[in-house]
């Protein structure tokens, strides 16, 4: 999930024994497919990309795994001061030979990580029946796959939905959003919710130019039948892309019902404080909503012509090869255990994230999760509307920045949708492949 920036905690070192959770077969104890000895002494480095609270949970789970399996050392650390910096650290590590065995990664980095030549090919591994690959949402599986090769295991799934402040709706006399809302309904509600006298806005949008800016546009593009790419050529400057960006422009420029966040980090706190009526966000917002005590609810995204597609921003565990079969196999086994339905229920659900696997919906942990986190059931249900994935191609990160800059210019009244998207497409030509 391309989530807001997260501060990361100090690392920890744990000694774990990794047996053939998904691997070893045959009397010799060797995994013929993986070519590694699950009983070998191995040291792995794991960059978790997690906050301090999540790191503490990771430590507990690692200790639980260690109690079950005594013999591979896992050196665990956040990897960088914020998750966003991990890609830069990984790139430097590839050059210097100091990269980890396992790293957290945003899904938008998949193409670049595949192009590095250091990611393990996990295609055969995840397609083993016992891995239950089909339990993970399709959009997440697509994100982990580059040119038909699985280069990572999804670590987290999410999607964008509409979160709204019930008190502001009641005060303005506006009916609550429904799953059948059109974008015209959304615009009309945003205008009614906006009150310049109290600096209250109907909705909000990031204009930092980051992926948070860009990926909010993709559902409006897809809902009208548009594409991000046509083969390896930019296609987002199509009539569908222009119409999608115009839908946002009229709220920002004409109606002035849209708060424009220059940083990515102000609009959710403003929503939590009752200054914004609606935000398009994901389940990561639930923790702060709960802490704020806001009266809120969640619906699916507005749509065009009855199409309510959303976008999912799966995050990944990328497994990096060091030309050592034992390290590679141990990394696979550990991540298989971490992403199993049983362990994931103790990991993602405890953190307030959506479950990684569909079968977790049947667990007691999921029942407790939906009770503890209002709106989480709607986010889970909305995974069914995540029908497409962002391109997993090398160069997507720069393409996204070009589109993000175009969106920011349009929403701030400095460019028209067609001209801005044409310019972004020109800058992005030849980037992807």
Image (cartoon, rainbow, N blue to C red):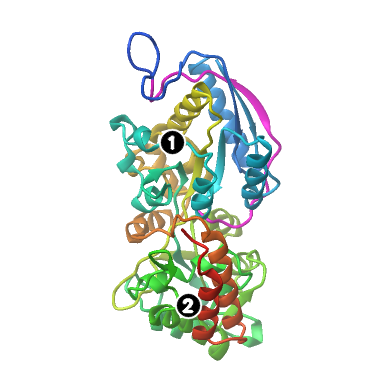
Which residue appears farthest toward the bottom when viewing the image? 254
Q: Is residue 415 above or below residue 341?
A: below
Which residues are the magenta region?
1-23
Mark 2 residue element: helix
Which residue is drawn at the image coordinates 62% and 83% (left, top)? 412
Q: Is residue 84 above or below residue 267?
A: above
Which image quarter: residue 24? top left
Q: Is residue 90 above or below residue 432?
A: above
Nearer the observer, 231 or 46:
231
Tell me where residue 36 appears, x and y as whole percent.
45, 19
Visible in this render: residue 173? Answer: no
Q: Is residue 111 above or below residue 25?
A: below
Which residue is the site of mark 1?
339
Majority secondary structure of magenta residues: loop
Instruction: Determine whether, in the image, residue 81 is placed left or right of residue 162.
Output: right
Tell me where residue 358 appears, x and y as whole percent.
33, 44
Instruction: Kindly identify which numbered label has been placed on residue 170.
Output: 2
* Mark 2 neighbour density, 10 Å: few (under 14) some (14–19) many (20 or more): few
Nearer the observer, 291 or 171:
291
């Amino acid at each position: 999930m391309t989530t807001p920036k997260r501060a990361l905690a100090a690392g920890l070192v744990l000694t774990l024994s990794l047996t053939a959770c998904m691997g070893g077969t045959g009397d010799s104890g060797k995994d013929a497919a993986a070519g590694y000895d699950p009983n070998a002494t191995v040291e792995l480095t794991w960059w978790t990309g997690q906050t301090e609270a999540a790191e503490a949970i990771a430590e507990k789970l690692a200790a639980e795994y260690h109690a079950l399996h005594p013999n591979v050392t896992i050196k665990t650390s956040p990897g960088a001061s914020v998750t966003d910096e991990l890609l830069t650290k990984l790139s430097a590590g590839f050059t210097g030979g100091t990269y980890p065995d396992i790293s957290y990664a945003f899904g938008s980095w998949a193409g670049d990580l595949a192009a590095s030549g250091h990611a393990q090919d996990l295609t055969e591994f995840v397609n083993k029946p016992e891995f239950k690959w089909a339990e993970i949402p399709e959009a997440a599986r697509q994100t982990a796959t580059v040119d038909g090769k699985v280069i990572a295991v999804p670590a987290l799934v999410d999607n964008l939905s509409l979160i709204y402040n019930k008190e502001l709706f009641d005060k303005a006399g506006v009916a609550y959003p429904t799953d059948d809302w059109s974008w015209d309904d959304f615009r009309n509600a945003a205008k009614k919710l906006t009150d310049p006298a109290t600096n209250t806005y109907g909705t909000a949008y990031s204009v930092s130019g980051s992926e948070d800016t860009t990926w909010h546009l993709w559902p409006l593009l897809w809902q009208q039948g548009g594409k991000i790419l046509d083969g390896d050529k930019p296609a987002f400057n199509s009539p569908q892309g222009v119409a999608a960006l115009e839908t946002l422009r009229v709220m920002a420029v004409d109606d002035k019902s849209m708060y424009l966040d220059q940083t990515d980090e102000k609009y959710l706190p403003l929503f939590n404080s009752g200054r914004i009526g609606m935000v398009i966000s994901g389940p990561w917002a639930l923790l702060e909503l709960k802490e704020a005590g806001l009266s809120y609810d969640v619906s699916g995204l507005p749509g065009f012509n009855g199409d309510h597609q959303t976008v999912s921003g799966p995050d990944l565990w990328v497994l990096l090869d060091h030309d050592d079969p034992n390290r590679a196999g141990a990394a696979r086994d550990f991540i298989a255990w971490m992403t199993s339905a049983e362990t994931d229920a103790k990991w993602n659900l405890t953190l307030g994230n959506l479950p990684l696997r569909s079968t977790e919906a049947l667990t007691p942990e999921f029942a407790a999760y939906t009770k503890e986190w209002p709106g989480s059931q709607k986010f889970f249900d909305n995974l069914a509307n995540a029908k497409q994935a962002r391109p997993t191609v090398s160069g997507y990160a720069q393409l996204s920045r070009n589109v993000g800059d175009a969106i920011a210019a349009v929403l701030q009244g400095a460019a028209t949708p067609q001209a801005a998207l044409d310019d972004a497409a020109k800058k992005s030509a030849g980037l992807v492949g």
